Image: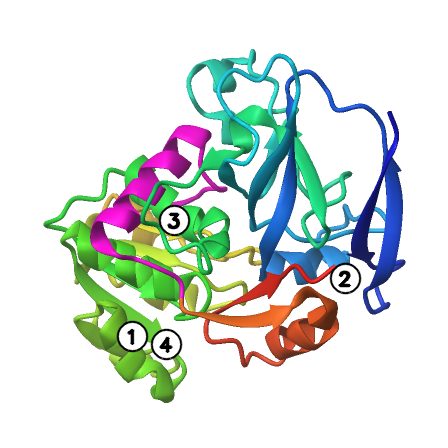
Amino acid sequence: MAKNIKAYAVKDARSALVPFEFKVGDLGPDEVEIAVESCGVCHSDLSMIENQWGMSQYPLVPGHEVVGTIAARGDRVPHLERGQRVGLGWYARSCMHCASCLRGDHNLCETGQGTIVGRHGGFADTVRCHWAWATPLPPGLDIESAGPLFCGGITVFNPIVQNNVKPTDRVGVVGIGGLGHLGLQFLAKWGCEVTAFTSSANKAEEATRFGAHHIVDSRDAAALDAAAGTLDFLLVTVNVPLDWERYVNTLGPKGRLHLVGAVLEPIPVSAFGLITKQRSISGSPLGSPATNIDMLSFCNRHQIRPQIETYPMSSINDALEHLRAGKARYRIVLKNDF
């Protein structure tokens, strides 16, 4: 049975978002329909709106940090009930039968579908996904700020798990923004000694509040040189080119530089600096459904939450301009006012 969904969409890469309605057919047997309460605004939404990654399809309804309640469920959904509050992030579907899915790496599924890639996302009154990607929110989690955990949060939590970061490790976070301010909180509560690399002097006090033990000016070559050999793990959350050799040199033996920011330019690094210290460079997407659950439990246990600013969803264009201008502190959440 066809249904109309109200949303905000862009018609092309240069347009503002405008009200948009579209029809959907019957709910699939393994799908759930989520009544959207709120949706975070992520820099990846901007990248998709502007087609920076070359895969946007218009009209495009962005939004992939959804919090809402189950409004309907297919007859093969095993556990979610109507009215249950869930979150939905970047992924909306994975095949459930490939080698990656069977290993529990659903986020690496070759045929996985993004919530806003070839689909309409959460800047809407309703969004649909496969049941595995609708993650129940645990009791006690702050609902208002939960949305950004499903992209910003899991993006920085997953590398900690995947790379076996230890509580005894010395770690760094490059970029104290929407991702980095959560990375600091996770790593500090993990037990690590944490260094924040930021180009904004006015963020030093906040970075300390988020858990950083040390602050380094990321534009100061002498400060970067002074940090040489001090880190076991360096999490890069920015999407701009850096002085890569200097950052690699902040790593000690067997240290790892890990990328979660989508830097579009190639990263020039000499092999010699990697080989002699057995260093490595890696990257990761968001996490699996199981890692999402672990992240939410960790946030609940340690009272980790994004620092947010809220807008009504009808003010989405104002929110996007605030984000474009680099003024967001540190994540934006839109509240459904359809």
- Residue carrying label 3: 271
Query: For the point 70% across and 55% down, which residue is it?
Result: 123
Report the amino acid beneath label 3.
Answer: Ala
Image vertical order of residue 132 relative to residue 180, above or below:
above
- Relative image position of residue 36 (x, y in whole percent): 63, 48
Label 3 or label 2, whichever comes before in sequence order: 2
Q: CA distance from mark 3 to mark 2?
A: 35 Å
Report the amino acid beneath label 4.
Answer: Thr
Tell me which segment is drawn in magenta. Answer: 281-306
Query: For the point 27% across and 69% down, which residue is it?
Result: 210
Q: Which is more toward the observer, 129 or 212?
A: 129
Disc marking residue 50: 2
Report the amino acid beneath label 1.
Answer: Ala
Disc marking residue 207: 1
Residue 53 counted in the magenta span: no
- Relative image position of residue 19 (x, y in whole percent): 85, 61
- Residue carrying label 4: 198
Q: CA distance from mark 4 to mark 2?
A: 26 Å
